[in-house]
Amino acid sequence: MKKMLTKLILCCFLLTAMSSASADFYHYKLTRPKAIYNPETARGRYYVGLGLGYDVYRVSRSIVGTKGALTADYNVTAIAPGFLGNFFAGYGYFFNNNFYLGGEVFLNGSSAAEQYNRVLTFDGQSLATRFKFSVGSSFGASILPGFKINRKALFYFRLGYIQARLKQQQNISLNGGNNFKVTKPTWSSGINFGVGLEGVINKVVSARVEYNFDNYDDFVLGPGIKYSAQDNQFVLALIFQVL
């Protein structure tokens, strides 16, 4: 009888100990802090981000038109503003805890568009031109060298390559006739420059404000029509640390 009582007491003790240990384990598992990226002390990081901004395209076009003995040669510049959506992903590393070097790929969508009408009159003749310009998507890759201002702020530069889908439509008529019309979407390449400032919000999220300048190669829409485009971007973005 005493042995059975002793065994029963021992079993109750073991069950109580196991229950307590199990409860402590699950409490620890649920409440222990995760090993996440600390932007103030980490040296390397993977990240993704979303941005929203405003861009302003400056489009210059040189047009040379000939009709019989008449020749028109003029340059026109248009400003095409619009809103910009931006997705990006990259990796960055801090050297000596102060100097930064990152690599980034990005994808943009823009609503920038402009329409321009112009009529030239010479020698009793009128030459009318109607120009439409719009921007679609763009993508590219950049390197981002920079340096820490303090433990929570990073200043950086951007240098990279960009491809943009630019759409142009040109109507040219002499004395009211429809003599020439062309619509052509063009993938144009260019160089991407920029500066930015990033600040830490918490251990997972940071924010940045950035200015970029894109200078695209010249492209030809049709006979006698040559274009060049530049873009000024102002972007505010949130960055999410992945690792």
Image (spheres, rainbow, N blue to C red):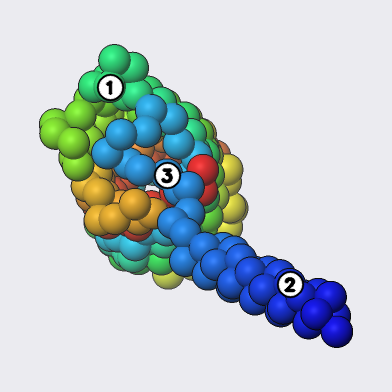
Choose top left, top right, bottom left or bottom right for residue 159.
top left
Residue 133 visible, this orientation: no
Residue 132 is situated, as x and y percent measured from the top left of the image, at: 42, 62
Q: Name the residue rendered at 51%, 43% in the picture.
A: 243
Q: Which amino acid, by three-letter code, is at mark 1? A: Asn
According to the picture, the residue beneath numbered tag 1 turns out to be 97
Q: Amino acid at mark 2?
A: Leu
Q: Is disc 3 placed on a helix, strand or loop? A: loop
What amino acid is labelled 3 in the image? Tyr
First-in-chain label (1 vs 3):
3
- Residue 86 in the image: state x and y as whole percent: 43, 56
Judging depth in this view, the residue of 201 and 130 nearest the camera is 201
Disc 3: which residue: 37
Q: Give the position of the N terminus as an image quadrant.
A: bottom right
Q: Nearer the viewer, residue 138 or 199?
A: 199
Distance between mark 1 and mark 3 Cα atoms:
15 Å
Q: Which mark is residue 10?
A: 2
